[in-house]
Image (spheres, rainbow, N blue to C red):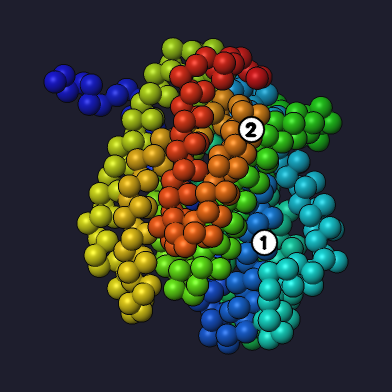
Amino acid sequence: MNPRRLVSAHDREILRLAVPAFGALVAEPLFLLTDSAIIGHLGTGQLGGLGVAGQALSTLVYLCVFLAYGTTAGVARQVGAGDLRAAIRQGIDGMWLALAIGAVLVAAAWPLVPAIVDAFGASADVAPYAETYLRVSLFGIPSMLVVLAGTGVLRGLQDTRTPLLVSVGGFGGNLVLNVLFVIVLEWGIAGSAWGTVLAQTGSAAVYVAVVLRGARRHGAPVRPDAAGLRTAATAGFGLLLRTAALRVVLIAGTSIAARMGDAEIAAYQVGFQVWTLLAFALDAIAIAGQAITGRYLGASDVAGTRAVTRRMVGWGIACGVLFGALILVVRPWLPGLFTGDGDVRDLLLASLLLVALLQPIAGVVFVLDGILIGAGDGGYLAATTLVATLVFLPAALVAYRTGGGLVGLWIAIGLWMGTRMLTLGLRARGDRWMVTGAVR
């Protein structure tokens, strides 16, 4: 075998973008983990309030992840076309859109805080703390969305190192502020919320400063542009629908597992956390795919786009096989780290087997999803993700109605992933998604 075939010319580029992206993805959940560790010492009610408010906030922000993805694709195309001024301009439009959406969300959610907390089923002891944390944290949503858009700008500019540094700095700031406000000043759960808001605002300020510096260097205007805002919103609509369909699967899976029984929901949550951890690594390759694909198509390099697509899919499959093998190796011992309940252990052992078997499929799905996002193929992604969701929902319901248990639920997730792999693979094999030029 020719050794050169084992190492592609694209590998260094993929790793240069994917490795820092993985670090940033892992750093982001540390915000809530830090809050949990500190608030947990205040009492059960406070910790439960954080859990409820955190779920509400994560839902709002998760639906707006298109601000990062859409901005990455648009900026990368302009970079590939050699127009850095237009790239920065498009990124600034994305950040203005993020700020506008954030302001609307704050205004809309503020009077609905009690209803939102109630919708999550908070008890009378938990609800007051959840409402306090959520009301304060709402002020951080504009900053959180600006961070998403700013991350997209830098990824589009082929820079994933700066977002990693910002994520690490934000985590450190959040930790210090939470200790100060909660432990030293004794502000309670509101202090934790204010600490997180300030840390998020600081992260957003860093992104704004970096983008403004780029705008000055390349002579890009920084005022909001109506046409640019419409373009950013239109590009993100398909990704919003895609994300909403994905969220339906996540919520439905948890809801069905909870209705199966206490042991089932406990085992499902642990299994899904393992799935999520591995998804971060696969999503890092997908992020590299967004940035690289957008740049190649912007440069009208169809052959290069096809070649790097094949290589990234290879990376996805290889990582999926590796992750699956690792799960199988640690599977006999992993349940003992989380529970001493025999029923939960048995359910988790069965779940982890399916999680392991699904990893190669997940590797293909995550990578192709990122590549098509980078190509700006949001409409197709929205339609096919909806199709996959419609495959999952009845399959999951059958698993529940027929007593299929967690194995049946994970099989439904496998059908969902298999449908996504089929539809994404068919699209990637064709040429319709490879629209070239600075603008799709």
Closest to the observer: 121 or 31?
121
Q: Whole-percent x and y of residue 197?
A: 67, 64
Q: Amino acid at mark 1?
A: Leu
Q: Whole-percent x and y of residue 37?
A: 50, 76
Which residue is label 2 attached to?
383
Q: Is residue 212 left or right of residue 353?
A: right
Closest to the observer: 148 or 435?
435
- Residue depicted at x 65% and y 19%: 440
User: Which image quarter: residue 367?
Assistant: top left
The answer to whether residue 11 is above or below residue 40 is: above
Q: Amino acid at mark 2?
A: Ala
The answer to whether residue 100 is above or below residue 195 is: above
Secondary structure beneath label 1: helix
Res 125 seen here: yes
Per the rendering, the mark at residue 289 is none
Q: Whole-percent x and y of residue 303?
A: 44, 12
Q: Is residue 198 left or right of residue 410?
A: right
- Residue depicted at x 62% and y 82%: 46
Which residue is label 1 attached to?
57
Q: Is residue 168 left or right of residue 123?
A: left
- Residue depicted at x 40% and y 47%: 281
Closest to the observer: 199 or 365?
365
Secondary structure beneath label 2: helix
Closest to the observer: 126 or 304?
126
In primary-sequence order, the first of circles 1 and 2 is 1
Few, some or many C-alpha atoms within 10 Å of disc 2 (few <14, some 14-19, many ≥20)?
some
Q: Whole-percent x and y of residue 272?
A: 45, 59
